[in-house]
Image (spheres, helix red, strand yellow):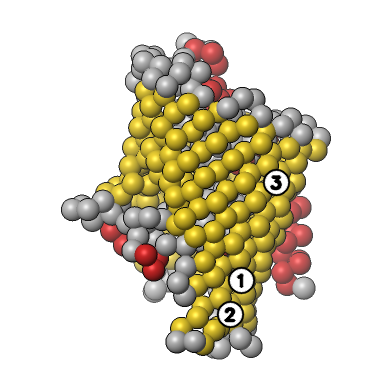
Amino acid sequence: MRFLISAIFVLTTSISMTASAYPDFIGFGYRNCIVCHENSTGGGALTDYGRGVYASEISANPLSKWLNAEETAGISNFLFATELPWWVRIGYKFRQLTVQSSPGSANTRNLYYNMQNDLNLNFFADEKHNIGLISTIGYLENAVAIAPNKAVAGNERVFLKEYFVKYRINKEWLVQLGMQDKAFGIKTANHTAVNRAQIGVGNNDQTHGLLVQNIKNEYDLFLMAWAGNLHLPKPGQSAGGSIMYEGKYAKSNTYGAAILSEKKETVKLTNFEVHNKMGFGEGNMLLMELGHSEKELTVSGITSNTRSDYLFTQGNISLTQGYFIMSDLEFSKVTAGTTSLETLKWELGFLTFPIQRVELRGAVVNKKTYNAPEAAEDQWSIYTQLHLSL
């Protein structure tokens, strides 16, 4: 009942919402990721069109007195108005997070995270960019944060985040082969959310595999098989696959479902999910994903199971171009044996793009824990985030 009341509250207060180069773009009529991203499942490097959309439709334009939307899009290249040769595209993304835990109390702590330093290097064999080599090199100040990926030999902080060959065969078929994200669920910017890291599809959970996508006006179908991250030692390589379907209804609404299964030496993981992405008005949206995950661990012939049920919702209200109110609700129930732990997290804040290439966000977060062995107080935190995209 507590969960249902909280869910209804968030859904009613966030019933129309949006963001940046994220699935939040459903509010602008972009129901799939392939239009704006080189990776057809979203995230990573932007296409030329995606850069133009970010600059002219998503970001505020404080220079509108001198530059109209088309002219603003014209300076969205990596070198601003200077275009690179058609066979190469470069991009850079920087993201920093500041978290204040237990604000206003004697236990207040301020933590700083350099979350992202990604260099995108993409090379193409044709001017329409139907055939290309897409790659991202990452750098993190904390080497531990690279896990479960692995640093490049001889440098504990530099790692290959993705590299794959992309081939757009025609309007209806696309193939990607190489190290890339797994096709599963809504790929939100918050990689620590209940529908990402804790079910094996987090920020650095890339894998070496083959993705085939069937693209229609009415739907998208993703079929993917992988051998695991081959940079890891053999025991850490999880082989498996996934199937994901997304269908279109109305102008800016999408429903979908996915199943994922993978296994390494001692662990078997199975995920199921259904999701819905809805756009309202100009730039408003609501995302919802409901899922179930099962992890089977076998050690010395003894098998144990952990089950996780989760609900993720995210919504943004568009105030004016480039400025949004955002709200997230996450619920998770993790069961191991006869013990269950439930958590409910609610986030309320703002998301802004005051000028192209710059994203600022901040929020107040409340986290409740139920069924803990000992009574747990609510956890409060405040975070701010800076994201630069060149």
Q: Residue 245 carries which label?
A: 3
Quarter holding the N terminus is bottom right
Nearer-the-camera pick, 261 or 113: 261
Q: Which mark is residue 329?
A: none
Above or below, 174 against 336 in this view is: above
Q: What residue type is labelled 3?
A: Tyr
> Which residue lies at the image location 41% right of the left edge and 55% below the top edge?
229
Instruction: Give the distance between the C-alpha atoms of the residues marked 1 and 2, in whole angstroms.
Output: 7 Å
Apparent side of residue 157 relative to residue 311 in the rendered image (left or right): left
Nearer-the-camera pick, 192 or 243: 243
Instruction: Give the distance between the C-alpha atoms of the residues marked 3 and 2, in whole angstroms.
Output: 28 Å
> Which residue lies at the image location 54% right of the left edge and 70% below the top edge?
268
Q: Position of residue 55 (x, y in %)?
A: 50, 24
> Which residue lies at the image location 68% right of the left edge and 42% below the top edge?
221
Q: What residue type is labelled 2?
A: Asn
Above or below, 36 against 341 in this view is: above
Q: Mark 1 points at which residue?
A: 294
In the structure shown, which secondary structural element does the residue marked by tag 3 occupy?
strand
Q: Which amino acid does label 1 sit on?
A: Glu
Nearer-the-camera pick, 46 or 303: 303
Q: Residue furthest left?
A: 154
Q: Earlier in the sequence, mark 3 or mark 1?
A: 3
